[in-house]
Image (cartoon, rainbow, N blue to C red):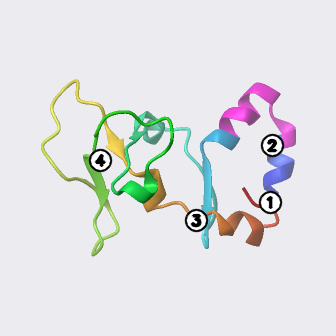
């Protein structure tokens, strides 16, 4: 179904969908909402990407008890919203859904 969906939309939009998609035991999720306004910052060195500069830390985290996204510090108007993408990413689940692996 996901592949059919990707094939049914314009190629440039399909690329955006692929960039903002992630998966897990729940299926495939595509963030084309306000969540796509949150950028990545590693919460630990193992999650640091080669392109990351500086020592920015996430200001949004997943609360372990409620599983909700919450601010870890006060966020002021104009602050960049940062979250560790790898805190909710599950690369193996793409293969489970028949979408291949990264």
Give me the disc on residue 6: 2
Who comes first in sequence, dot 2 or dot 3? 2
> Which element type, helix, strand or loop, lies under badge 1?
loop
Q: Is residue 91 magenta?
A: no
Q: Position of residue 8 (x, y in %)?
A: 85, 38
Give the CA separation, mark 3 to mark 4.
19 Å
Mark 2: which secondary structure? Answer: helix
Mark 4 and mark 1: Cα distance apart in space: 29 Å
Task: Give the residues in magenta.
Answer: 7-17
Q: Is residue 10 magenta?
A: yes
Question: How far apart in space, not on screen, are marks 2 and 3 (Cα)?
Answer: 20 Å
Which callout, 4 or 2, points at the residue further toward the start of the chain? 2
Q: Are marks 3 and 4 in contact (CB under 8 Å)?
A: no
Task: Residue at 64%, 40% (x, y): give it.
Answer: 19
Question: Disc 3 on helix, strand or loop?
Answer: loop
State the residue position of label 4: 58
Q: Is residue 2 above or below residue 53?
A: below
In front: mark 4 or mark 1?
4
Mark 3 Cα-neighbour bin, 10 Å: few <14, some 14–19, many ≥20? few
Crowding at label 4, few (<14), some or many (≥20) Cα neighbours within 10 Å? many
- Measured from the top left, where is residue 81 in percent x and y? 31, 37
N-term mark: 3 or 4: 4
Residue that numbered label 3 is attached to: 90
Q: Is residue 12 left or right of residue 67?
A: right
Which sits earlier in the primary sequence, circle 2 or circle 1?
2
Name the residue: 87% across, 41% down.
7
Q: Neighbour class for label 2 at 10 Å: few (<14), some, many (≥20)?
A: some
Q: Which mark is residue 99?
A: 1
Residue at point 80% right, 34% down?
A: 9
**CA separation in Å, label 2 and label 1:** 12 Å
Discs 3, 1 touching: Cβ within 8 Å:
no
């Amino acid at each position: 179904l996901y592949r059919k969906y990707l094939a049914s939309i314009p190629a440039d939009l399909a690329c955006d969908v692929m960039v903002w998609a992630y998966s897990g035991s729940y299926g495939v999720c595509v963030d084309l909402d306000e969540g796509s306004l949150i950028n990545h910052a590693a919460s630990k060195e193992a999650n640091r990407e080669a392109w990351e500069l500086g020592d920015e830390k996430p200001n949004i985290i997943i609360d372990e008890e409620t599983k909700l996204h919450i601010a870890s510090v006060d966020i002021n108007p104009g602050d960049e919203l940062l979250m560790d993408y790898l805190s909710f990413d599950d690369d193996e689940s793409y293969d489970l859904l028949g979408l291949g692996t990264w």
